[in-house]
Amino acid sequence: MTTARDDTIAVRISKVLAERIIAGEIEAGAKLRQDHVAEEFGASHVPVREAFRRLETQGLVVSEPRRGVRVAGFSLDEVKEVAEMRAALEVLALRHAAPHLTRAILDEAEEATRAGDKAGDVQAWEAANRSFHRLILTPCAMPRLLRAIDDLHTASARFLFSGWRAEWEAPTDRDHRAILAALRAGQVETAASVLARHVQWVGQKPGTPAVTRR
């Protein structure tokens, strides 16, 4: 039985490991050894096992009987699947969020887009991009849906980091601006359509970032 403290430690461990996997510091196929992770974080095996379960839910690791836990690989089909799922769930969230989007929220989302345009590396861009999506979707007030979307964002980040690892060029995200313009005009279905196309772009070409269009 886990305690609240174990849960807190598990979240911290899962976040650190997720960041390493997404950044490519831990490569696909690498084994995650429970005792090594527990020693690094000064934790018992209970929160480490919970952290592994969280990572498995996000699609970052796989657990195999008698073989332990290893970092998951990903194929183009998986990239496309994540993109399709994100498109469907984010559109659903946006439709529920739209009536609650204030001018202040949209202004903050626009600022996040500007921050992405000025990002000096892929990590900074991904953080700004995720902030934009969270800002326009969170007012849907559907926590389970938002958790599912957040897990899919984590998977998407890994695909994008892989595609951008060799070189980085800050993108100009016109889709974000089109979404904001439609929301400001009360054109929710137009915003939803642009959002779906925008999210699905990540699955179109292997290793191609989602916003290489200018």
Image: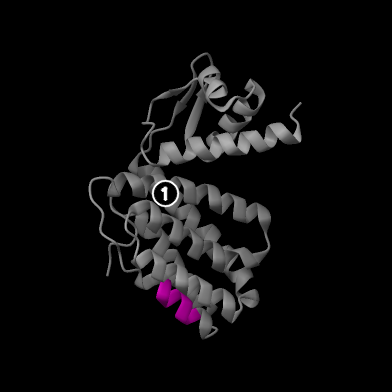
Q: 43 or 93, which lies in front?
A: 43
Identified at 52% across, 79% down, the residue is 183
- Give the farthest residue toward the bottom: 185
Q: 8 or 154, which lies in front?
A: 8
Position of residue 171 in the picture relative to residue 78 (left or right): left
Identified at 64% across, 77% down, the residue is 99
Identified at 36% across, 55% down, the residue is 202
Residue type beneath disc 1: Ala
* Quadrant the N terminus occupies: top right
Residue 7, by quadrant, is top right
Residue 39, by quadrant, is top right
Vertical relation: 139 (above or below) 13: below
- Give the farthest residue toward the left: 167
State the residue position of label 1. Answer: 157
Vertical relation: 188 (above or below) 29: below
Q: Main secondary structure of the magenta part?
A: helix
In this picture, which residue range is highlighted in magenta? Answer: 176-182
Residue 135, by quadrant, is bottom right
Where residue 138 appears, x then y in whole percent? 61, 63
Colouring used for the render: one colour
Residue count near mark 1 (Cα–Cα under 10 Å), binned few <14, some 14–19, many ≥20? many
Position of residue 172 in the picture relative to residue 143 (left or right): left
Question: Is residue 179 in the magenta section?
Answer: yes
Vertical relation: 187 (above or below) 119: below
Question: Is residue 142 in the magenta section?
Answer: no
